[in-house]
Amino acid sequence: MLSTGTRIGTTRILSWLGEGSTGQSYHCESTEGDLKGNLLYVKLIHREISERNGFEDYFHQECQTLEQLEGPGIWPIREFGVTKWKHWIGYEWLEGENLPAEGEEEDGPVIRSLAEFMEYNPVSLTPELLLDFMISLHRGLYRIHQSGIAHGNMKPSNVLVGKTEDGGGEAWVTETGLFRMGKFRAVGDEESFGNEVTSLNQDGRDSREEADKFRPGNPDEPDVPDESWDIFALGKIVRWAIEKAGGKASQWDQWNSWAKRASATGQPDAFPSIAHSMQALPGVGDLSEYGVKAEELSEDQKMDLEALKAKREKEWALSEKLGNLRFRRNMTGLVAGLFLFLFLFSSIYLFFLPVPWTEYSLSGNTDIKKKASDSYQLGAGFRSGNAWGIVPPACDEQGLGGQSAQGTWEIEDGLFKLSFRRLKKSKTEESGKKRSDLIFAGNTSPDDYSYWIDYLRHDASREALILVKREHKDEVFVPGSEGKGSITLYPELRLKKSTGKIASAELAFFREGESGFSWSLFFGLGFLLAWFIYHRELRKLETNKAESIE
């Protein structure tokens, strides 16, 4: 980086602009000759390049050729020279367009390049303005290509833009030929000898990476750009500009189609020349108006294009159908997986736990209802949850029971421990308030409740809950029966002292409602069958597509 005031040939540096992949950029003033006092944009070739053997002669020859390039769409060379290691090229300075500043004390940004235009004023890009820019660039590149030169480094920062008096737009190609200079290889060097500049700063490396985005990937001769490179770059630039402008509207459809074909390097339907690329611009009109002529394609080329178009239309139709089939297959597979997972999960859950929110009630044996609950429900959970039951007569002050009771359940020693409590009726009679009002107001104490705990065993094979014991008022009750009498709850001590008169009995609460049929398994298998059908059709279609491409 050279400091302000340093002389570069016949120019004096006013300010540093930056570093790119092909050289350093300065804002300079011409100090000698016809251009004395004029502002210039000066490109200083990297010293690593300029000190290669034979570069100076090559530099003079190239600049003399490039100096002849003038006309619409070309930003021409004004001066060039060599001073010691400094090989420099001067271009006319573009004042650019000043955008309004946000604050009164600050100047707004200045737009000179397409990169700056799309950064600071992207909403101004319209299909009509883009056409003006692209016509200018095509005219410039047409003239450049006729001279046997390809730019090779087309990117938004190398495209200068401006407004015309009638409100239209114009653009110019700048830094033509510098990419090829940067690839100069000294006489005698092998082709494998690296010619990339290794001393680039971060700005230079970023510039090189940015330029690579607008060049064809893996070209056969990466050091020698040709016309197809510039056409490819124009297509990429158009796509980039439309994206920056948020161009998803239908007004950009034709431009997107043109850009896709322009960047189809190596494909049969790619534009064979910059003139053909210009001829296909949306709304361009007659090329003769711009001094450009597109050579007629041969009949073989036309037939190839028509065949390719038909082939691609068929491929697009197949691709669309493939996309639909893939989506359907994936969705049915996903739904099948969800249902089968639900079935597997529920099967495992129900193997260890009762069906949640389902009533388990007594069948027959009505005498037991005098001393025990007649139904239970358990909420969902793995180790604990909510529970619901019926207040047994023994836990009711009036000996009636039958009211609903809510509690909790947890697993203890392999049994389901259901803990219940109920506000005593005497408490509500004393206060004259409703049970819910007392509870929610917090005007109760533990002594105001009746408590009982039921221990149940889950029998998954019979879908039943077996009452093992009940704890109430510091006493344990177990189910039993005397002789052929009905089953009821006896104090555990009494059963042990009965010397066999009272035998232990099973008190089972069975699940109500239908069971055994799994809708999750049914839907899971149904969607799985649909997945197999879509998958089979997809494989057939993929095979047909592969055969059609061959």
Image (cartoon, grey):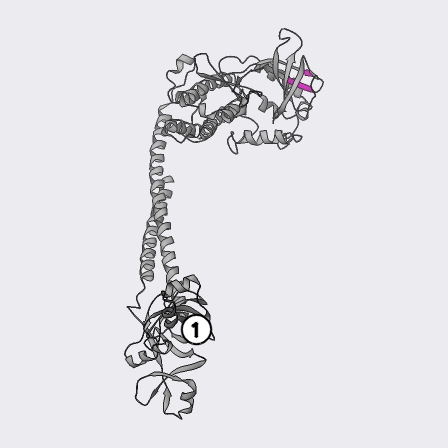
Q: In the image shown, does 400 or 208 lie closer to the viewer?
A: 400
Asked whether residue 442 is in view, the answer is yes
Tell me the magenta residue range. 82-88
- Relative image position of residue 441 (x, y in whole percent): 42, 61
How many discs mark residues in the rendered view?
Answer: 1
Residue located 43% across and 69% down the image: 409
Q: In the image shown, does 338 or 464 lie closer to the viewer?
A: 464
When the figure is inspected, residue 217 is found, relative to residue 386, above or below; the finding is above
- Relative image position of residue 26 (x, y in whole percent): 63, 20
385 falls in the magenta region: no
Asked whether residue 344 is in view, the answer is no
Classify the position of the N terminus by image quarter.
top right
Task: Say which quarter of the image contains residue 410.
Answer: bottom left
- Relative image position of residue 478 (x, y in whole percent): 40, 82
Q: Is residue 204 left or right of residue 516?
A: right
Residue located 34% across and 83% down the image: 488
Read off the residue under disc 1. 417
Q: Residue furthest top?
A: 34
When the figure is inspected, residue 83 is found, relative to residue 499, above or below; the finding is above
Chief secondary structure of the magenta portion: strand
When the figure is inspected, residue 415 is found, relative to residue 524, above or below; the finding is below
Q: Residue furthest bottom?
A: 499
Q: Secondary structure at mark 1?
A: strand
Residue located 43% across and 73% down the image: 417
